[in-house]
Amino acid sequence: MNIFKKIKVAVLDILGKSDKIVDEQLLGTIDSTRFVVLDTEATGFDYENDRILSIGAVSLQNGQINIPNSFEIYIQQEHYNQATAKIHGILRESVLDRPNELEALEQFLTFLGDSIIVAHHTIFDITMINKALERNGFPILKNKTLDTAVLYKKTLLVSPLFERKDNYTLDDLADKFDISKKDRHTAMGDAFITAIAFLKILKKLREKKEITLLQLFK
């Protein structure tokens, strides 16, 4: 083994990635990294048959939520579900001149770029977006993702005296961190709540020990 390969293996061993190629993006710092915290509202929970009604997203960098650099879009409704409309409040005729799904996705992808995605219960939002991308001839998202529901568990004590839940809702995190739920169940409102919760989680993790961007994904 030549000296350069030895050095590479040593660095990967330190990072706990000796058998994998470490993505350069994860070698950056948490503060310098641009995160896009997002939420979607949809007609339901069926990945194949339901559709996204709105996407809300805020960018986060250097420990701050960049409110002016945010993204919110409502999409033309192909489907209407009266039951879920009672939750998110998006009526078929409530917003005029909505872009179609293709136009909305093009705008969202421009805003997102190669940023790391943060969401609460990420699998739902990412799957809904990927299904929409596939319908419109786009490749699925390749962005790395973080789930605040998973990250929050890392802040909790491991003790037989403390009962941990299998699942923590966004309401749980809002209550824990005393975050206003005024705009709950809107895409932008939930994205903003998630962004604040993400910052609170980072603060708690850093109180335990210094944490790197790479460690957030472990």
Image: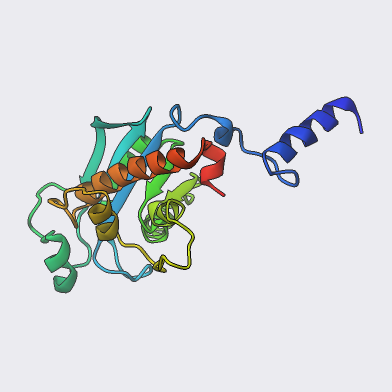
Residue 35 position within the rendered picture, expressed as x and y whole percent measured from the top left: 40, 37
Residue 198 position within the rendered picture, expressed as x and y whole percent measured from the top left: 35, 44
Q: Say which residue appears at 55% left-offset and 34% top-offset.
A: 25
Given residues 186 and 73, the one toward you in this image is 186
Most extreme residue toward the bottom is 83
Q: How was the colour assigned to the protein in this rendering? A: rainbow
Most extreme residue toward the front is 161
Q: Say which residue appears at 24% left-offset and 53% top-offset.
A: 174
Residue 178 position within the rendered picture, expressed as x and y whole percent measured from the top left: 21, 49
Would residue 15 appear left or right of 66 to someone viewing this image? right
Say if 148 sits above or below 195 in the image.
below
Say if 150 sits above or below 82 in the image.
above
Residue 172 position within the rendered picture, expressed as x and y whole percent measured from the top left: 28, 60
Given residues 189 and 72, the one toward you in this image is 189
Given residues 160 and 32, the one toward you in this image is 160
Say if 215 sits above or below 164 in the image.
above
Q: Say which residue appears at 45% left-offset and 38% top-offset.
A: 206
Most extreme residue toward the right is 1
Q: Say which residue appears at 42% left-offset and 55% top-offset.
A: 156
Q: Quadrant of the N terminus?
A: top right
How many callouts does the rendering have? 0
Please identify the quarter of the rendering in which residue 40 is found.
Answer: bottom left
Would residue 123 appear left or right of 80 to someone viewing this image? right
- Is residue 206 visible from the viewing direction of this image? yes
Please identify the quarter of the rendering in which residue 85 is found.
Answer: bottom left
Say if 105 sits above or below 67 in the image.
below
Would residue 164 appear left or right of 101 to someone viewing this image? right
Given residues 54 and 9, the one toward you in this image is 9
- Is residue 105 visible from the viewing direction of this image? no
